[in-house]
Image (cartoon, rainbow, N blue to C red):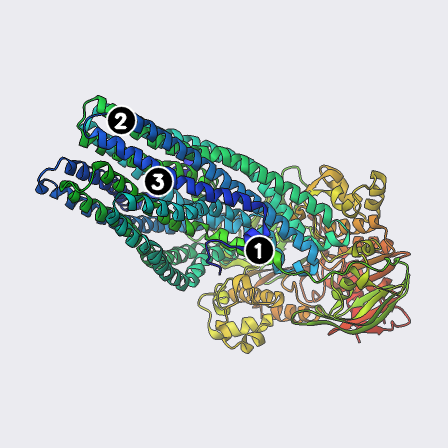
Amino acid sequence: MIPGAERAVLRLARPYLSRLLGAGLLAAATEFAGLALMATATWLLMSAAGRPPLDRLTVAIVAVRALAVSRGVLRYTERLAGHDAVLRMITDVRARVFATLAARRDAGRRTGDALSRLVSDVEAAQDLLLRVLVPGAAAAVVSVLAVGVAALISPPAAGVLAIGLLVAGVALPALATRLTRRAADEVAPLRGALAVDAVDLTHGAADLAAFGATGAALAAAENRGARLAKLERRLAATGFAVDATGVLVGGLTAAAVVAVALRAGVGGVLVGVLAVGSLAAVEVALALVAAARQRAQLRTGLARVADLLAEPAATAPPTSAPEPAIDGHDVRFADVTVRYRTGAAPALADFDLDLPAGRRVAVVGPSGAGKSTLAAVLTGAVRPDTGRVTVGGVPVAGIPDEHLPRVVGGLLAEAYVFHATVKENLLLGRPDATEADLVAATRAAGLLDWVREQPDGWDTVVGEQGGQLSGGQRQRLALARALLAAPPVLVLDEPTEGLDPSAADAVLDSTLAATPAGHSVLLISHRLSGLAGLDEIVVLDGGRVVQRGRHDELVARPGWYREQWLRQQTAERGYLAVTP
Amino acid sequence: MNRRPFDPRLLRRVPAARRDLAVLAALGGLTALLVIAQATALATLLATAFDGRLHRPALAGLVAAVAGRALVSWAQGTVAARAAATVKAALRADLLRAVGRHGPTWVAGQRAGQLATLAGRGLDALDPYFTGYLPQLVLSVTVPVAVLARIVFADWSSALIIALTIPLIPIFGALLGWQAQAATERQWRRLSLLGGHFLDMVAGLPTLRAFGRSRGQVDVVRRMADGHRQATMKTLRIAFLSALVLELVATLSVALVAVPVGIRLLGGGLTLSTALLVLLLTPEAYLPLRAAGSRFHASMEGLTALDEALTLSATDAPATTEPRRPTPGGRGEIRFEGVSVAYDRTTALRDVTLTIRPGDRIAVIGPSGAGKSTLLNLLLGFVAPTSGRVTVDGVDLAGVDLDAWRRELAWVPQRAHLFAGSLADNIRLGAPDTPDDVLAAAVADAALDEVVDALPDGLDTRLGERGHGLSSGQRQRVALARAFLRDAPIVLLDEPTARLDSASEAVVLDATRRLVAGRTALLVAHRPALLADADRILRVEDGRVTELHPTATGPGVAR
């Protein structure tokens, strides 16, 4: 009955069960107050028509006034209680989702779309409770109560009412669910294609114009838009038939209740109460149609959240494994092979490297040669298919997540700059850093002058995803953070990316100078400038080591390194030569 | 922000929707009549049932009225959805056509993202507005008026109570609504900051993990989310207050009407059927107003999208003069005569005078943002000179048919856009009817053949949205293949190797050399490797163009 995805979300609601139950009861009371108001008012009028003494109507008069006031007040408290419970649960969901993602070693960076989808998926859990379960449960409770009260007056009339309520509260919602799902399945591909058209026509506007293809692309998009419009019109015709049937069921139930009750000999006043009450009850039950539609729309979002919550990491407490006996920080790669997909060419093949403490090694090579894979293997983000990587004699895979960064870390590909101050971003590297540490690290990364120029200095907010910074400043900030962390094995993946050649040389020099002696460095670079001081240079191509040695040796020998080095040198000097 | 419930610009801009909206209004009137018919029939039925009799005509009337309401409600939904579909399709087409009308420089940057979102999924937010809010808006006018009119005839004192209380709903709605709005806006910055925090943390997870801080941040995320909850609850306490007052007005009015009517019934001053009619109709008068109010919130997003779409697509395009001059051939001499280009905030080019002779291979260098791309955009007709003119063979480009002139040009941008479709379609962009053998030749010329061989379906491989699945180097080779197919006398290259690593750069450079051979070429070069092939070098700095005279040994191997 309840799909697994919903159950997974509901399990998180358990601590707030009493609050939710309270909200559901309040919602039911609200709806029931509305129904009772109309029924009591009808009883009042029809009894009054019999001209009884006024005091026999006093209770009804008071009840009508009380119900009128209580409905609004009940609604207000119900909504507050429901939202409070659900928002508490969402706090848990967010924390759990984050914990799951945090525990994944392999999770790469997400695109903006995937991120905002994650946020709206979490909100789907909120809608499931507030717009589906609470109103749905209230409608069900009121329906049962209404049938019960009707049965006290006239069992046959109660039977008719029950049928009407079953149609309105069970059959129609089931139909609405099916129609909503079908409509979504039909519309989604077309809407997706149209969204792609819109992207192509806007982001590709220049290409289209330059090649005279704007007209054709526009016509194709308009054609698709017209097809979508046609489909939407057709789907609306069937979708709204459900609502129309709901209106019909309400009126017919009331009419049938009157006819049946009269035949059963129910007194006139109570016939009126039954009729008006039935009309109101069916109206309440029809809320289940809207709830069913909402639920059908939440399906995919909830499934994604449930998948995240189902991962064991979300439930496992943070590991409190004892710190492994890491002896020193010599790094050793032995026969490491990594394949991202079975059958694909290896990203790294039979790779061997010794990085004893204090050694500085550069890994160079064309793009796609396996350089970043190497960094990912060393930092534990990627597990080797065969071979082993050890740090201080302990395999990387055996070092818990919390311990590994204290030994191996640095500037990795696509370092993220948080929407926070410069200082907060830096302190991520070492929370207990002093002002002097910050100054030293930012000076080495070439960011200190910029920080000092800012009116807010260290407290300058860098904006969403570092948006207030230029690409070069963002890179320098990430580099400074890595230097501040100063792990004994420092990995630097393209530390001077996005800097112009002269700045790149200066930053690389000061970075290497700022790394304490005794700390090892694994520098990954596509630029070959400034590598002369390193202990070893490894040239990777196609995941394999093709050359290794010191800069002087490699430049003296024919091969990729020499060729590329000459090429880069000529290129940079030639460029300078024509710059007046 | 536009808070009007209905934007009159809509009727002007989408005339096709007028009829549907008129039908919607008529159906609203019909609904009002049926509401009264249903209440009248039910009141009669119950009044006779009081005596234990079944009034068959009233029963039939009730069933007929209900059937009528069902039918009308179906028609209302269907027509509203039709209007939504029509308006969305029309606005989408308008928006996308605006792109074609204004040209690529108008759409560049942030506006492209806004337009793509709006024309893509953004406009779908109009669905709840049209199918949920608009029909209720109509009903909130027709039903109270009709109900009031009917009750005036039945019992004017009850009508007075309703007439006095009904305005309270929009008045309170507006007052409390604005109050809530202001409170919401005050909270908004804080809320979005907190909501954004979760996003920021998730986006930066790999970095947190790299510093061993990911687990520790779980508590921070929980704390921030809890702060979010408290802030939200503060807002909601006020926001729900408006609903409370509206609900109270509606239910108390029922009590205000029912109790006096009951007491007058006791005195015999009223018939039972009239009293029941008043009771049944009273809540109907308040219902549509409250329903419209509660649905307004859900349709806000749609109204905002509508406002954006109407505003964006209405922006005037620069007056396009009908092409009066014959299109010059691409083998004529190109002259820039005192050309300046000013954008909103910056001046891209200042007083540039320049002659490009057929067959010239010109490299354009200079710092980024200096105006290099503007030089190419002038030739492409993407921007027009603010002053001065660009002529080809003596013909001013301002007066020619741009599509025809662009046929003389092949353009390789910094980062070519790859369209959703097959690789072959992407290469054939400018020439959809290209035969396969010509296509194959262009593929080979652009050194794309090895890429094609490695793809699962070769040239038929589908490239996803924005061409995911090809590396930057491969993407540039697609752009080169497009240019080869164009086979135009003039080629414009805008830093074709800007984002490539050395290995891809070498391949693209070789292909570029083949492309440039025998053609007039303008190469914007950031990387020095491109300079070797140029026979003239222009330096653009701060909007001014100076010609450099290469050293005797040539620029690429200087020194």
Chain letter of mark 2 equals B
Instruction: Tell me the quarter of the image containing the C terminus of chain A.
Output: bottom right
Q: Which residue is mark 3?
A: A133
Q: Is residue B335 left or right of residue B141?
A: right
- Which residue, as the protein is rendered here, is positioned at the far top? A263
Query: Which of pointers 2 and 1 indicates the residue nearer the eye?
Result: 2
Instruction: Tell me the quarter of the image containing the N terminus of chain A.
Output: top left
Element under disc 2: loop
> Up-down: is A240 above or below B14?
above
For image coordinates 44% across by 68% down, the residue present is A432
Query: Which of pointers 3 and 2 indicates the residue nearer the eye?
Result: 2
Task: Residue A457: give x, y in percent of width and height.
Answer: 51, 75
Query: Which sits in the foreground, B299 or B439?
Result: B299
> Up-down: is A128 above or below B102?
above
Share a chain, discs 3 and 1?
no
Q: Is residue A29 left or right of residue A435?
A: left
Q: Which residue is mark 2?
A: B55
Q: Tell me if residue A488 can be seen.
A: no
Q: Amino acid at mark 1?
A: Leu
Q: Which residue is mark 1?
A: B310
Task: Residue A92: give x, y in percent of width and height.
Answer: 37, 49
Query: Which of pointers 3 and 1 indicates the residue nearer the eye?
Result: 1
Q: Amino acid at mark 2?
A: His
Share a chain, discs 2 and 1?
yes
Query: Which sits in the foreground, B43 or B502?
Result: B43
Task: Residue A255: give x, y in percent of width and height.
Answer: 30, 28
Element under disc 1: helix
Element under disc 3: helix
Query: Which sits in the foreground, B158 or A395?
Result: B158
Q: Earlier in the sequence, mark 2 or mark 1?
A: 2
Q: Is residue B238 left or right of residue A395?
A: left
